[in-house]
Image: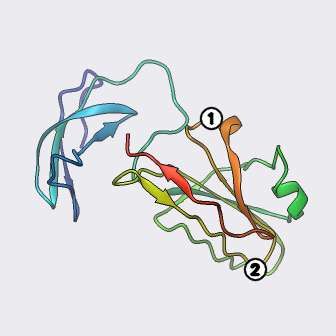
Amino acid sequence: STGSTAGGTTVTINGNYFSDSTQYPIEVNVGGQPCTVLGSTQTTIQCQTPAAPTGSQSRYQGGRGLQLYSTSGSNSQATLSSGSPPTPTGSPTWTDDALYVSSSLSAETAWLIGFVRVLKTANFTFILDTNGDGALYLSSDDNPNNKLLIASATSNQSATILLNNN
């Protein structure tokens, strides 16, 4: 859809398995701002867009998939698991899967970056499956400085982590 930066555009989202429970209300964000839900079924959501936010944001919460960055060259396990691991450069592509299989014949470093929004508050365990060096970080917000190492190639399963639906 296209619409005014003043908001007010009705957007229809089609999919499957949308919540129809008041216990798990549907939330839609456009440009990082709440989109007022006008109605929903298990396959359709309609909402009215807000006015465009002032300023800029580099990341937005949402279910659009994960940003995938890939660069040539490898990093050691010590570097990947350090307090300041390398950060991605270049332009990302988007993927719907938390899976990356390289087609490169040479060493490469890949990053998958995105948001996790759980359907309900629960305990989770994360597993990192890699055939080389790797590290898995989790943050409570979009600030990279708040990330914590939760798994690595040498310790591939995280401790149990409570994630809240809020």
Residue occupying image coordinates x 15% and y 46%: 22
* Label 1 secondary element: loop
Residue 151: horizontal and vertical position, in percent? Answer: 70, 62
Residue occupying image coordinates x 68% and y 76%: 102
Residue occupying image coordinates x 42% and y 50%: 117
As drawn, 77 above or below 114 = below
Q: What kind of colouring is applied to the model shown?
A: rainbow
Compare residues 22 and 103 and report the one nearer the observer: 22
Name the image quarter holding residue 14.
Answer: bottom left
As drawn, 66 above or below 36 = below
Farthest residue in the top direction? 54
Please give the residue where the numbered disc 1 appears in the rendered image. Answer: 143
Q: Amino acid at mark 2?
A: Asn
Dot 1, crowdedness within 10 Å: few (<14), some or many (≥20)? Answer: few
Compare residues 111 and 120 and report the one nearer the observer: 120
* Label 2 secondary element: loop
Please give the residue where the numbered disc 2 appears in the rendered image. Answer: 131
Residue 113: horizontal and vertical position, in percent? Answer: 59, 53
